[in-house]
Amino acid sequence: MGELLFSKAGKELTDIKKGFHAACRRAGIENLRFHDLRHTFCTRLASSGINPFAIMKIVGHKDVEIAKRYTNPTDDYLMTAMSKVSLNSPVSFHNSSIKKVVAENNQSNLKAISNS
């Protein structure tokens, strides 16, 4: 480590908010806080299958409850996870809309297999 991620002429930047807001303005991005990038980073690590404890170590979280707040699974990630579960397994679906989507997904997968 040792090198600074954000520096100007080799000196540590103590506040990057001004530059971040200017970059957002130039890009036409509204309502984005620098801190939102931390949430996105944690969510993408989790969606990539990175172990939650590794994510905590990477971003410096010491408490699992804090780490949970930073990981927001996307609908696609949830659907992929749910599609790995067979409807005939002992797992119960608490949400009928999820059960319906998983059933439809399983049907389309069966059709694709039988057509190949």
Image: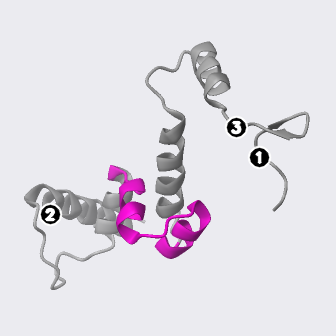
Q: Secondary structure at mark 3?
A: loop
Residue at 31 percent of width and 59 percent of height: 79
Which residue in the structure is indicated by mark 1? 5
Contact, mark 2 vs mark 3 (Cβ under 8 Å)? no
Extent of the magenta region: 51-75
Front residue of this view, candidates 97 and 62:
62
- Determine whether 7 is above or below 103 in the image: above
**Image coords of residue 52 (percent x, y):** 47, 71
Residue at 26 percent of width and 66 percent of height: 106
**Image coords of residue 102 (percent x, y):** 22, 63
**Image coords of residue 9 (percent x, y):** 91, 33
Which residue in the structure is indicated by mark 3? 14
Q: Secondary structure at mark 1?
A: loop
Q: Is residue 35 left or right of residue 98?
A: right
Which badge, 1 or 3, is on the more N-terminal residue?
Answer: 1
Give the amino acid type for the residue marked by disc 1 in the picture: Leu
Q: Nearer the viewer, mark 1 or mark 3?
A: 3
Quadrant (top left, top right, bottom left, bottom right) of the C terminus: bottom left
Q: Is residue 60 left or right of residue 111?
A: right
Instruction: Find out whether residue 56 is within the magenta segment.
Output: yes
Distance Cα–Cα, label 1 vs label 3? 11 Å
- Determine whether 2 is above or below 37 in the image: below
Give the amino acid type for the residue marked by disc 3 in the picture: Thr
Q: Secondary structure at mark 2?
A: helix
- Residue 99: which disc? 2
Which badge, 2 or 3, is on the more N-terminal residue?
Answer: 3
Front residue of this view, candidates 56 and 76:
56
- Determine whether 113 is above or below 31 in the image: below
Quadrant (top left, top right, bottom left, bottom right) of the N terminus: bottom right
Contact, mark 1 vs mark 2 (Cβ under 8 Å)? no
